[in-house]
Every structure is written in structure tokens, then in C-alpha cells.
Image (spheres, grey):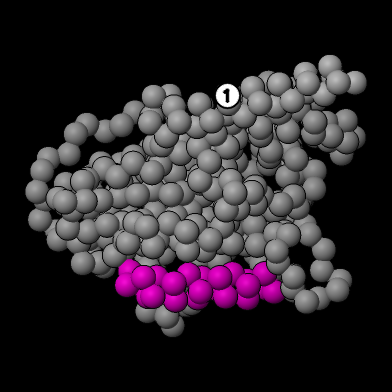
Amino acid sequence: MKKIALAVSSCLISILVFGAVLELILRQGLIANPQYDRLQIQVKHSHARHKLLIIGDSFITGRSVAGRLLSRDLAAYRVAVLNDATGATGPFEYLEELKAIGPKFKPDIVLVSYYAGNDLTDVQNHPRFNSGAPNDRHTGPAINTYSSRPYLRDLYVYHYLLPQILILRSRFFKYREMEAAGIPAELIEDAKAFRINPWLLALALYGKNYFLDNLLMETHANMRAWEKVKGLLAETDEVCKRQQAQLVLVIFPASVQVNESHFEFFKRLKFNMDMRTLESAKPQTLLREFCGAKNIPCLDLLPAFKARTSEELFVDKDTHLNAEGNRLAAKLIIEFLLNNTAIDRMKLQPAGGLPE
């Protein structure tokens, strides 16, 4: 027994030492990692006229084309950009990140991105949300709520290993139940091989009304979640004011609000689909009304995307923007910031080439 205990202790010590060394290497940026990338400030504080903090989900992370374009092009206006957007997060996490990062970075502008395609259900299915209605049930899987927890938020090792952790978790999805639910076998095989996002299949299995809940917002549960979203955004605005920063909200549209190109794929995954999502702008309308009442500058990207329905702006068999969609979003966001914040419109240095 003593030998076993000694072996276990030695193993644990080795793991801790390895973790500590890896953490140090990641913090120095000696190995490429998302935490190091997203916390890099593109313009030195001493030369910056403004400091912009970006908070949101995978639509605007520092590694996305949109995130990279924002950092690069705003540097020409001497804006220091700290991109703290993290994939698989929602309004609860946006607020927590602002509270954690804001006092350290001291931004004068805070850009919060809101994805109309899932931020409502990110709140509705969140373990911290209690609607007060006993008959309300979660309508889908919860998002990654761990990323904003204090004991994980600042660990580079956690963010470095997170993709591998998510891949490992996807190996244990209930693929047999997915096939029994009618999801085609070839799509299940594509998910297992990561040719398509396996989390979409998990979402289809447990949240068939995903698109309807977020974009039509017709149920009492949806509207109770919306009331919570408003509360979280109102608190976000109050935190910004206490930090002497201006809040700016950017609303990213869902693909099924823009054109029909993804409908057949989502139907094959057995999502409940409704062509009315192509005409619905309910989440955008409610958000614009909320921002108008609070005097929060709000950029709704949906009209500009709808104006280019002949083009494909979303990744095939996915819900995210493709490179062209990212470029359009970044262009519109920069123009909006120049017109609605204190950023000086005069460029001070040329920007480099477009990121791939």
C-alpha cells in the first residue's frame, strides 16, 4: 500500500510540476495559445488614445477574421484593443468577464457582441438562471459555463487544453440516440470525424426548437429569458458607467435570418425549422428598443447582411460566419465605432494586408 501511495503521490507531483511549467511557457507566448493571443494589446498603452475591450463569443474572438481585422485596423487610430471574447459563452459570462477584466484594463469603450442565434437560449438554459416559473424546463444543452469561473478564467493551461477537452467530451455524445432520432448516419460520421461540428448534433438532439426559440421568441419561457437578458445587459451598462467606459452593442444575425442556404442542412439534423425566421427580426428589434431606452449605441448587422443575400456569408454546414461574412462585419463595426464613439477618425498609420 505504501508503494502504491508513493507512486500516486509521485504521479500527482509530476503532473503539478508539468502543469506549472506549461503555464509559465504559455504565459510567455512560447507556445501559441488562445489565452495569450486574446490578451495581447495591439497598440502600446503609451501610444494609445483609446482602449477598447471586446467581449462576446466565437463570432468575434481574437483569432476570428473579424477579431483580427478589428485589432489591426483600429491600431491605425491608436486604439488599444483587448479582445476577451471567448467561444461558447453568453450574456452571463459577458458580464462576469467585464467585471474581471475591466478594472485591470480600464477601457473607455466596451464592445459587447450579441449573437441573435443563441444568446437568448444561452441564458434560458443557463444553470444560474431561475425563471421563477415551475413549469419552465431547459430546452437544450447548457453552454460552457466554466470559462468565466475565477479559478479557471486566468489559467492559460485551461484555455490551451479546452479544445482537447471539448473534443474528448464529444466522443461520449449519444450518437445512437441521434441516429434513433432520425439524424442521417452520414452526418453522424461527419461529426465523429469533425468534418462538421459535433455540438450541432448534440444541440439538435436536445434542443430541436433552437432556431425558433432564439429568433421567433414565441414561448413564455423565451420571454422570461429575454427579461433576464435585459437585466444582464442593464447591469453590464451600469458596470461600464462605473468604470467610466462607453458600452457599444453589436448584434450578429443568424444564417436563417439572412437566406435559405442552410435550411436543408438543419432540417436533416432534425431541427424544427420555420421559414418565418427569414422575416423575423424580433431579437434585433427588442435589443434596439432596449438600447434606445438606455442610450446605448447599437449596431444591428442584419440589414447589411440581408442586402447581400445573393452571396454566401456563413460557413457551409455551420452557424458561423465565413471569411467574407467576417470581413463585412468588421468593416461595419469599425465604421460604427468611428461614428458613435470618441475615437478620432483621422488615421495615424497605414494598416497592413488582410489576414487570411
Residue 356, x across and y down, in percent: 34, 28
Q: In this image, 79 relative to 15: left or right?
A: left
- Specify start and end residues of the magenta stretch as a single range: 223-245
* The furthest residue to the front: 2
Check disc 1 and report its element: helix, strand or loop: helix
- Disc 1 marks a residue whose amino acid type is Phe
Residue at position x 12%, y 40% in the image: 350
Residue 167, x across and y down, in percent: 67, 29
Identify the main secondary structure in magenta.
helix
Q: Nearer the viewer, residue 292 or 281?
A: 292
Does the rendering let one see residue 322? Answer: no
Position above or below: 35 against 306: above
Pointer 1: residues within 10 angstroms few (<14), some, or many (20+)? Answer: few
Residue 248, x across and y down, in percent: 37, 65
Q: Nearer the viewer, residue 107 or 27?
A: 27
Does the rendering let one see residue 44? Answer: yes
Q: Image quadrant of residue 175?
A: top right
Residue at position x 59%, y 69% in the image: 229
Position above or below: 275 against 234: above
Q: Image quadrant of residue 29?
A: top left
Residue at position x 88%, y 36% in the image: 177
Q: Which residue is mark 1?
A: 18
